Amino acid sequence: MHQLKPPLHVPQAPASEVTRLRTVPRKAPGLHLIGDLHHCVCDARLMTDAAYLEDFCRQSVASAGLTTVGSLFHSFGAGAGVTGVVVLAESHLSLHTWPEDGYVTLDVYVCSYTSDNSTQAESLFARVMQAFAPADPHLHRVERA
């Protein structure tokens, strides 16, 4: 029989601070580009080699004029997929590969807090998607406000 743990106590901010936080207008519009890339025909290293994919993504970020602050890529074993993220000063690039299915999920999100980074996001997304050469891309564009 499992013992129930008491709920975690989360300190509450004073009511005056909660009210102040709720009245601050949002100042971080952004662009979120999402792709489900089916039937990819590409260099196999992009699908299975974490170090190769990380290097490609970091170079793509720089080419798009965005700023990498860190990255983490993980391989699921020889010939298996990779999951990875590049954390950007402007937000993130993430992707997951399934080489056995020729499938990749691609996610680029950038904030436009001080300047409009939409063009850079579109450039990064296009460069990465083009490298995977999907025969059947399903793309979504979300304007965040």
Image: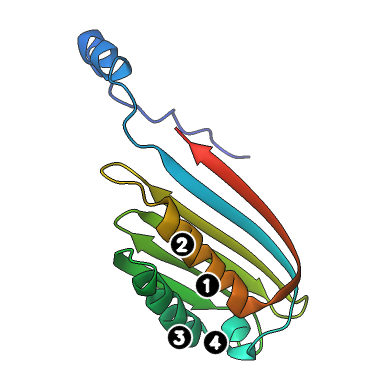
Does residue 78 appear anywhere in the picture? Answer: no
Q: Is residue 110 above or below residue 24?
A: below
Q: Secondary structure at mark 4?
A: loop
Q: Residue at x 42, y 43 (%)?
A: 30
Eye-nearest disc, 1 or 2? 1
Give the structural element (helix, strand or loop) at label 3. helix
In the image, which disc is placed on residue 127? 1
Task: Please tell me which of labels 3 and 2 falls first in the chain.
Answer: 3
Mark 1 neighbour class, 10 Å CA radius: few under 14, some 14 to 19, many 20 or more:
some
The alpha-carbon separation of the residues under discs 2 and 4 comes to 17 Å
Which is more N-terminal, label 4 or label 1?
Answer: 4
Q: Where is residue 123? Give x, y as percent.
A: 47, 64
Alpha carbon separation for disc pair 3 and 2: 16 Å
Of the residues under marks 1 and 2, which one precedes in the sequence?
2
Residue flagged by tag 2: what amino acid is it? Leu
The residue identified by callout 2 is 93
Determine whether label 3 and label 4 are within 8 Å by CB: yes
Q: Which residue is mark 3?
A: 51
Tell me residue 21's x, y (percent). Answer: 27, 19
The circle drawn on residue 108 is none
